Image: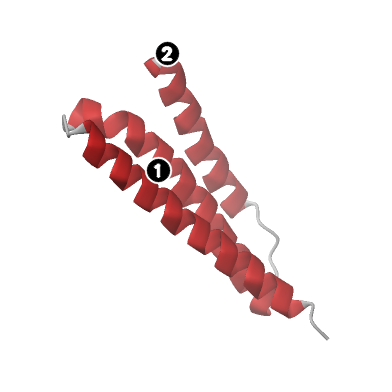
Amino acid sequence: METIAFVLDIFVVIAAFAAYLNRPRIGGQLFDGLQRVMYGVLLLGIAHLSEIMLPIVLEIDPVFNEVLHGLLEGGALVFLILGFNRMRETFRV
């Protein structure tokens, strides 16, 4: 099961990177918002990948691993919220 989870996490990171590379080429606040959303998605992928890899590679404490995972996910959600907020401001009249 760990191998399946690892492969899925790699897929999430690759998909986030591909989404970033294929994002629409727009300017202004909409671009800023979309870029922040993409950073959030990429950070979410990294958070899940690190949750699988860190205990294997560095043999860290499981509790510390969960705290780190939560912090990374929280940071990703902040990027998502800020990005969507910036995009919403673009459409305000």
- Viewer can see residue 35: no
Q: Is residue 13 left or right of residue 24?
A: left
Residue 58 lies, with reference to residue 2, above or below; the image says below
How would you rate the neighbour count of disc 2 (Cα within 10 Å): few for under 14, some for 14-19, many for 20 or more? few
Which quarter of the image is occupied by the C terminus?
bottom right
Judged from this view, the residue extending furthest toward the bottom is 93
The residue at which mark 2 appears reads as 1
- The quadrant holding residue 66 is top left
Residue with the mark numbered 1? 47
Name the residue type under label 2: Met
Question: Which residue is found at the position 51% from the left and 31% from the top?
Answer: 11
The amino acid marked with disc number 1 is Ala
The numbered mark, 2 or 1, whose residue comes first in the sequence reads 2
Query: 67 or 31, which lies in front?
Result: 67
Instruction: Pick the residue in front: 62 or 91.
Output: 62
Q: Secondary structure at mark 2?
A: loop
The residue positioned farthest toward the top in the image shown: 1
Between residue 21 and residue 5, name the one nearer to us.
5
Tell me whether circle 2 and circle 1 mark residues in contact (CB < 8 Å): no
Label 2, label 1: how far apart the Cα atoms are: 18 Å
- Across and down, in percent, residue 24 comes to 70, 60
Q: Is residue 12 left or right of residue 86?
A: left
Above-or-below relation of 80 to 72: below
Label 1 element class: helix
Residue visible at 47% across and 42% down?
Answer: 45
Q: Image point 30% across, 45% down: which residue?
A: 67
Residue 22 in sight from this viewpoint: yes
| Residue visible at 55% across and 45% down in the picture | 16
Q: Position of residue 70 (x, y in %)?
A: 38, 47
The spot of residue 62 in percent (x, y) is 24, 32
Q: Is residue 91 left or right of residue 47?
A: right
